[in-house]
Amino acid sequence: MAILLATFGAGTFVWTFGHHDEPAVKAAVKDPNERKTAPDFELKDASGKIVRLSDYKGKVVLLDFWATWCGPCNIEIPWFTEFQRKYKDRGFEVLGVSMDDDGWKAVTPFVAEKKINYRVVLGNDQTGDLYGGVEALPTTFVIDREGKIASVHLGLSGKNEFEAAIEKLLDGAGPSDNVEARRKSGGA
Amino acid sequence: MAPTLTIEPLSTVKVTKGKVATVTIKASLPEGYHANSNKPTYSYLIPLTLKWNPGPLQMDSIAYPAGITERYGFQLPTDKPLSVVTGQFSITTKFKVPADAPSGPAAETGTLRYQACDNKACYPPKNVPVNVTVSVE
């Protein structure tokens, strides 16, 4: 198995190649004091409602850049649907950003067919640029309750890897996730 | 990093008025990447397509490479193998040359659209310009 160290916007991760049961990117959850703020954006959902990432502050968010024509994305989407159902009551949300050029014409039937139970918005190149130029799909960011990027996953990743990150951030229960960082910085 | 499909430069194609002319485009993808064939396995996949703009010749037919069927690491065991193109491949277009076509050099332009993936990720569809110079005799 080949391993490649790379840097992507919010930090360093290890890229591995192997079967899809294995993670494409072993994106360790960063320490709270190493996390960068997830850029805010305004995008429309299928009903035309404006959705801002900042609307989700206080929640752990799995931000998934995907497209209907992306095979690896299709593997992850059922996992994210499961996560949405499993963790929603603990302050977790999945937000899907579709990068389909054909817009809702392509996305709406796909969302219905896949029974996607989380909010989906239409992204664009500007949105991708905010996140370092999202080119490979899927690209997924797990964001902590304070709106900071805790892990980045490029390409098809492992279900367990996502779940471990979500659990860790949920258990961090928001501000307490930053206890160590505040202690180091001399805060309360 | 998104793969770049490259097209081999074409030399001028000599065509004869009232006859059929054949233009073959040779393209290639870097190792480790694949693009959907013109007839992808699933309807939601974006096919390899060549579109010619209106020009002095009349497009008659396009012959795409037969896709090879492959399974990839991102597929579920229940998924069908994908029909893809990899490495080098050719697309052949037959043009009808009108009997009244003006003699001399002319250009045929078009766009080759593809959507590529590797074993873990997919990349947005891209359009590559295709330019052929023909000499009408």
Image (cartoon, coloured by chain):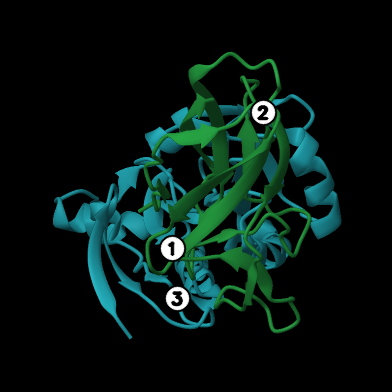
Q: Which kind of residue does numbered mark 1 sit on?
A: Gly
Which residue lies at the image location 64% right of the left edge and 35% below the top edge? B51
Chain B rendering hue:
green
The chain letter under disc 2 is B
Q: Would residue A54 be visible to someone looking at this image?
A: no
Amino acid beneath label 3: Pro
- Between A124 and A91, the residue placed more toward the observer is A124
Labels 2 and 3 touching (C-beta < 8 A): no
Specify whether A183 is left or right of A36: left
Q: Colour of chain A?
A: cyan
Tell me the element at label 1.
helix
Q: Chain of mark 1?
A: A
Q: Position of residue A18 (x, y in %)?
A: 43, 82
- Upstream in sequence: badge 1 or badge 3: 3
Marks 1 and 3 in Cβ contact (< 8 Å): no
Q: Which residue is mark 3?
A: A23
Residues at marks 2 and 3 on the same chain:
no
Indicate the secondary structure of the residue bearing disc 3.
loop
**In front: label 2 or label 3:** 2
The quarter of the displayed image where residue B79 is located: bottom right
Task: Report how far apart the C-alphas of labels 1 and 3 lie in the structure.
Answer: 23 Å
Q: Which residue is mark 2?
A: B97
Above or below A141: residue B52: above
Which mark, by number, is residue A172?
A: 1
* Residue A92 appears in the picture as rendered: yes
Q: Nearer the viewer, residue A28 or B67?
A: B67
Crowd around label 1: few <14 · some 14–19 · many ≥20 (10 Å):
some
Same chain for labels 1 and 3? Say yes or no.
Answer: yes
Query: What residue sits 67% from the left and 67% below the top?
Result: B83
Q: In the rendering, at what x and y percent does residue A170 appear?
A: 51, 62
Quarter of the picture containing the C terminus of chain B is top right
